[in-house]
Amino acid sequence: MIPCMVEDVAMLELPFNNCFGGYIHVALSINDYIRALLSQPQLFIDYGIAPCFYIMSYEAGNMAAGNMAGTYYEQGQMDMAIVHYKQAIECDSGFLEAYNNLGNALKDVGRIDEAIQCYHQCLALQPNHPQALTNLGNIYMEWNMVAAAATYYKATLAVTTGLSAPFSNLAIIYKQQEMRQVQYSKGNYADAISCYNEVLRIDPLAADGLVNRGNTFKEIGRVSEAIQDYIHAITIRPTMAEAHANLASAYKDSGHVEAAVKSYKQALVLRPDFPEATCNLLHTLQCVCSWEDREKMFIEVEGIIRRQIKMSVLPSVQPFHAIAYPIDPLLALDISRKYAAHCSLIASRYALPSFNHPNPVPVKSEGGSGRLRIGYLSSDFGNHPLSHLMGSVFGMHNRENVEVFCYALSPNDSTEWRQRIQSEAEHFIDVSAMSSDMIAKLINEDKIQILINLNGYTKGARNEIFAMQPAPIQVSYMGFPGTTGASYIDYLVTDEFVSPLCYAHIYSEKLVHLPHCYFVNDYKQKNRDVLDPNCQHKRSDYGLPEDKFIFACFNQLYKMDPEIFNTWCNILKRVPNSALWLLRFPAAGEMRLRSYAVAQGLQPDRIIFTDVAMKHEHIRRSALADLFLDTPLCNAHTTGTDILWAGLPMVTLPLEKMATRVAGSLCLATGLGEEMIVSSMKEYEEKAVSLAMNRPKLQALTNKLKAVRMSCPLFDTARWVRNLERAYFKMWNVHCSGSRPQHFKVAENDVDFPCDR
């Protein structure tokens, strides 16, 4: 035991004399007295004790020196600990624990090579020393040399199954890509779960082990099991804030949003300074339109982000969330930059040499031959909005000019969307079972000249592949409506309205302006049935009133904010016999929005909610509304194209960030933008009221919109693909000229494009 601190010389004399009286226990006594004296080091000097104890430690041999070293180590005095561990080894060159513990002390002061040498010396004396094996594994784990780390952890477990740390760390390795494990393989995660099971066998009350196993369950979609583990961990350790926060995340993923809010709040009660929980709580509240403390929380979250960026910490707000938040666009850029840097860090761990790129020789241009080799990388080739919108694009490329490679980061979901892209693209490669470095090597071996990132910062992205720079030109498009902040992404494909050059400072990429609208869709090919007057739905099919003027917004509820909802309430007050049609997207927001409407003086039935519908039905039933009201904070993107194809006009207010301007671009590409785009919230309200109160004017706009659907640029996918190819040729020609990437505008008679000559 550690005695109380000796406070005066009289108290000191007795234990000092006693240590000689019981010499057989000198080493243990010295250790105890040193612990007491270290708590008041001045005693060494004041009473001349230090030399005496130093001599006794030598006389007592290796045990005393080792114990003294251990005391210094516990108190964080690593230099002194190192000195005494070395003394212990001098006394006994076969002192196993001294070698291992000296390694620990050396590691803690950053002398890693010497630490490794100590662990190996320990293993030379006892090859199966479990702590030394584990410690070597930990060093290689920290270096991200996970194959070597796994070897040592497995060696430890071959010796003993009584240590939980090797199981925990081996589980982490099984979940990483560095060992070239299959990212989406359930077997890979099964190994991780088995390791956590062993941790819990050793210590059934290991709350950390339960949380880690829960995290693994959550990652493979076994959310109910994750919830059980988190709850069990909380039962064992009720004050564990991480368990409450992870439980909240699992609740949110499973649609139990109210429970998620409660758990996030409990995590913050336990740990008020918990940035991840604070930011995730804000996002969860935004998803269900809980706006009571919204302004205060955004101020707090913005402060968190700025502090994290200043400290070079990865922000707790993800880039995809930032695009829908009312924050400074330059702050959103900084968030993306930090995430891009993190992807570069991940890429660096693969330790790949720089890739050699295809020679910058003009293709299909003056003095050139061959085709441009274009690669599309995405986790969304399947039943996903991206494939719904781009399904025809990959097969529409002109094979005389362009050779297309689609690299699928997700396994085959066997849907019509996946099968179509797979059959129509010239080359379709499922790389979901490959590690990121192997995918990058494959892309480079395929001699891809322009590589397109269709994910950005969305689920399933593996942006570290782009950080490895397997292609000479790398482009962001479609998946993420914002800047990547990445130095390794050269261009962002956009248009003049969505990303005007006056806002170029909020993007890290050079801007490529396509004609008309950058946002592509596939409705002319896949949804022509909407145009058939015999396939129309009736309002009564969805419980919608036949006699009311129906405003609609089918955006997810997180895109709404108090200002736009108050404006909608004002519009409803000014337009008699009108209602607002919203989606339960999610359902947890319905009660709050109805309450807000009542607080604004409206009857609850003025707000109508319906469930989210399947894609084809959703587009067709959209035409049952009279006017679509967009959300300025984050526009309707896919939803915007849906409703315009259905022939439903909209009112939209563009702001500054990319995600706030997409709907305006969609409207302009119909040729009717001036009738649907406004420049202020006041004008937004007046435009909506004016159209609702002037039915002939609105009907004329609706008729014009329906009439242009088959001819306007917005829905002309083949025309859009030609323009995209023009952009690719321009990018390549700029590269071949030796110039750096630059902003440029694509013209539909571009002489750099083979078909225009």
Image (cartoon, grey):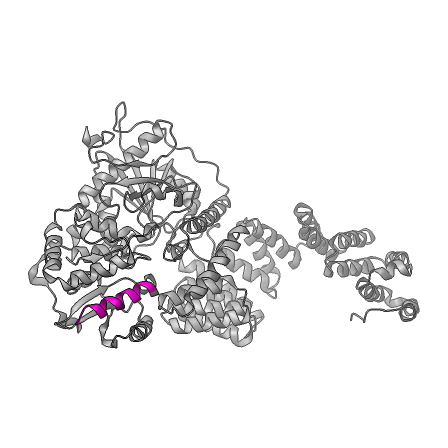
Indicate the quadrant where residue 6 lies: bottom right
Which one is in front, 329 or 614? Answer: 329
Of the 4 image quadrants, the one containing the C terminus is top left
Q: In the shown orientation, is residue 647 left or right of residue 137?
A: left
Indicate the quadrant where residue 127 lies: bottom right
Which one is in front, 44 or 322? Answer: 322
Q: Position of residue 755 (x, y in %)?
A: 19, 32
The answer to whether any part of residue 382 appears in the image is no
Q: Position of residue 413 (x, y in %)?
A: 29, 57
Q: Residue at x 48, y 65 (%)?
A: 277
Instruction: Say above or below: 89 vs 369.
Output: below
**Dominant secondary structure of the magenta stretch?**
helix
Magenta stretch holds residue 743: no
Q: Residue at x 53, y 58 (%)?
A: 170
Which one is in front, 301 or 341? Answer: 301
Q: Residue at x 33, y 30 (%)?
A: 734
Q: Residue furthest left?
A: 534
The answer to whether any part of residue 713 appears in the image is yes
Q: In the shown orientation, is residue 392 left or right of residue 324?
A: left
Indicate the quadrant where residue 474 lies: top left
Q: Residue at x 19, y 46 (%)?
A: 717
Q: Position of residue 267 (x, y in %)?
A: 50, 70
- Specify the segment rendered in magenta: 563-577
Q: In the shown orientation, is residue 537 left or right of residue 414?
A: left
Q: Position of residue 63 (x, y in %)?
A: 81, 60
